[in-house]
Amino acid sequence: MKRILITGMQHDYNGIEAFIMNVYRNIDRNEYQFDFLTTHDAIIACEDEIQSLGGHIYKVEVPMKENFFKHFFAIKRFFKENGKKYYAIHMNSCFPNYSLPLKYAKKYGVNVRIFHSHNSSDMYVSDSKTKELVKRIKYNYERYMIHKRATHLLACSDEAGKYMFNKNKFTVIKNGIVLGKFKYDAEIRRKKRQELKIKDNTKVIGFVGRLQYQKNPMFLLKILHELVKFDKDYMLLVIGVGDKEQEMRDYINKNQLDSNVTFLGRRSDVNDLYSAMDVFVLPSIFEGLGIVLIEAQASGLKCVTSDNVPILTRVTENITYHNIDNIDSWIEDIKKYQLDLNCRENAYRKVEKERIRYKKYC
């Protein structure tokens, strides 16, 4: 059995976590086994499931933000003691800000060293020119070191690869989903809408993602605010957590949208919640891919998204891309959409029938 060391898992279940777990659940674990190294001391997503599948979870004693030097030596010690038992290390990251495990994986005998890009832009731009310059220098240094330390450079899209690796060659690995998990189900729709106290005639807009700058969640609320002026039977389901949540709640209270928004936080039943939705909206400022759009289309949902999202997400004709500077086009697209639940089942069958064409995802 070949053991693979995985990094990049965080507490919340987002795109990277979904990609890793989709792979882990479907590999031949008699031939390959995943272990997980975290560079923080928090619980990671799916810990119980990982352990039930035979994976070990190793946590660095001292996170880098607390003590860089102790963290440095903790990583070195881990690979000195464990490096030779791993066939490969697979680092998953959104930003070129950390490649230390690759350094010691290389030094202590891990011959296959993979760095995998999952994003296409920086999360924050500092108001301070000095801080921004320091960040740029650090990122460019790490890009150089990633290229020197890794044996394979992977990305979830061309955009993610160009951002992370500059002009260095990389391979695009298209994120996969388990297609059947997201099939629209009328009975699940009925149960979930009943559970959430949603009326049959309510038009449900869905969002799944971190509530932070990249995902542009305030734009969602501005869309909703305009839609309810036209029709009060719109509801927004927000699945996820993040540092923008309080700002969103303040906007909701100020604009009297309390009855039109439901925050669901972290959920383990997102695949079922897609059936309860009518339209899926993702107004991201940037995306490595946007795997939730693939999931939503598999559920037969109409998807309205940003033109900052890679065109690779178009796996059906039921998706449109809009500029985030033109909110009117988003509103008109959502308003004119006519829900047909029979078409949702047919949409799934179409994807299933053409799964060879869409095998990159399904």
Image (cartoon, grey):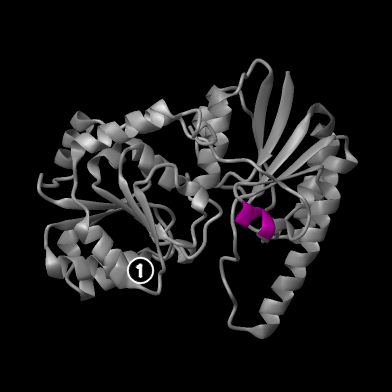
| Vertical comparison of 205 with 189: above or below | below
Residue under numbered circle 1: 218
| Vertical comparison of 341 with 261: above or below | above
- Which quadrant of the view contains residue 143? bottom right
The secondary structure that dominates the magenta segment is: helix
Q: Position of residue 308 (x, y in %)?
A: 49, 62
Magenta range: 158-162
Q: Position of residue 215 (x, y in %)?
A: 44, 61
The residue carrying pointer 1 sits among few (fewer than 14), some (14 to 19) or many (20 or more) residues within 10 Å by Cα, namely many
Quadrant including the N terminus: top right
Q: Secondary structure at mark 1?
A: helix
Q: Position of residue 313 (x, y in %)?
A: 47, 48
Taking the image as drawn, is residue 193 in sight?
A: yes
The front one of 314 and 148 is 314
Residue drawn at the location 77% of the way across and 47% of the way down: 101
The front one of 294 and 243 is 294
Residue drawn at the location 85% of the way across and 38% of the way down: 80
Q: Position of residue 191 (x, y in %)?
A: 18, 34
Q: Answer whether residue 161 is magenta in the image.
A: yes
- Which quadrant of the view contains residue 270? top left
Taking the image as drawn, is residue 44 in sight?
A: no
Q: Given the image, on which type of amino acid does mark 1 rest?
A: Met
